[in-house]
Image (cartoon, rainbow, N blue to C red):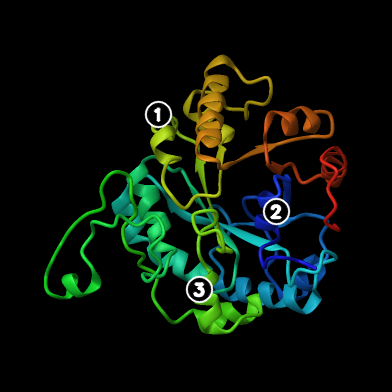
Amino acid sequence: MPQRINRAIELLAQDQAIYYVGGHSGHVLTRAQGREDALTWADYINVGMEHGAFDMTGLAEYMAGLVEGGPTRSGHRTPTVIVEAPVNGTDAANVRFNAWQFRQILGRGVHGVLLCQAESAEAVRAFVESCRYPHHRAGVDPALPSPLERMRGAVGAAANGGLGIGTRGRGSEATAAPIWGLSAEAYIARCEPWPLNPDGELLLGVKLESPEGIANCEAILAVPGLGFAELGPGDLGLSLGYVSVPRHPYPPEMREARERVFAACRKNRIAFLETAAPETILRQLDEGVRVIAGHREDTARIGRAHQRRTMPV
C-alpha cells in the first residue's frame, strides 16, 4: 500500500530515482488523455506550460481523468503531476507579480511546480512562499512579526536565508482536495513543500538555465522548500553560443556548470534532474542523479533493476 499521496516523493524519500514523461509543450490535456495516462510506466508526468498553453480548464479535466483511470499499479490515486510554470524566476518582483500562476496551477490538484530560469535566491524564495499557505512556519524566519503584530503595522523582512510568510490563499482547496482524495482541511495541511515539511506532498523544483542562474546556484539551492533542481543545457547552451543543444560529453564551460549545480544539490540534499539513456543510466545513478528525463521506458527498467526497486510500476 502507498505511504504517501505523491508517488515521486515516496520514491525520493527511499533514495530511489524517479522517471518522468512529458515535454515542454504539446501535452494533451483532456479527460480522456488523463484516463489513458493513469497507468503510465513513469513515476511522474511533466506538463510543460513554459512553452505550452496555459490551459487551466484542460488541466482540471486531465487531473479528473487521471483519478477516473486510477489508481496506479503502485496503488497511488494518480501518478504525480508536475507543471512547468510560464513565469521566469529572474527576480523576486517578477515572481511575486506572477504568483497567480502558481495559485491557478495548484488549484487544479497537481503535485508539484517547476520554476524555469531561476536566477536569484530572492526569486526562488518568492516562488516557495507563493506556493505555501501562511499558517505553515517550517523554514520561516522566526524573527518576522507575528500576524497580530503585522495587523498593528509592524513590518519586517526575512533574514539569513529564511523564508517569508506563505502567500497562497484559501479558495482552491475545494477543487484540489478531491483530486488528492482528501478533505479540504487535510489538503491545506499536506500541500506543503517536501522535504522542508517531512509530511508535505508538494514537490517544488527549479531549472538553472542561464549564466546568472549558474553564478547564483549555491545561494539558490540553499533556499528552503526545494525538492529537485536541474541544469537546463538547452537554454544555457544557447546563451553560450551553442545553437544545437549540448549533450554529454559537455564542452568545458557546460561541464563546469553541471558540476557546480550538482555539488550544490548534494550539499542541500536536493535531487538532481538530468536526461539519461539506457547506456548512461547506471553511471548516472551511481553518481547520484535521482530525477531522470529522457522519456524512455527501457531506461527506467534498467535503472529500477539496478537500484533493486520494489514499488510496483
Q: Are marks 1 and 3 in contact (CB under 8 Å)?
A: no
- The answer to whether mark 2 and mark 1 are in CB contact below 8 A is no
The residue tagged 1 is 215
Q: Is residue 113 above or below residue 209?
A: below
Residue at figure coordinates x 41%, y 48% from the top left: 89
- Give the mark toward the camera: 2 or 1: 1
Secondary structure type for disc 3? helix
On-image quarter of the C terminus: bottom right
Q: Secondary structure at mark 1?
A: helix
Is any part of residue 32 visible from this angle? Answer: yes
Residues tagged 2 and 3 counted as in contact (Cβ below 8 A): no
Question: Which residue is at 69% across, 57% downward?
Answer: 10
Is 110 situated left or right of 87 in this image?
Answer: right
Q: Where does label 2 land, which residue?
A: 22
Residue type marked 1: Ala
What is the residue that sits farthest to the top in this orientation? 252
Q: Quadrant of the N terminus?
A: bottom right
Q: Residue type at mark 3?
A: Ala
**Left or right placement of residue 188 versus residue 121 in this view:** right
**Residue at (59%, 64%) from the top-left corner?**
201
Q: How many marks?
A: 3
Q: Secondary structure beneath disc 2?
A: loop
Q: Which residue is mark 3?
A: 189
Query: Front-most of 154 and 277?
Result: 154
- In this picture, is 212 found above or below 140? above
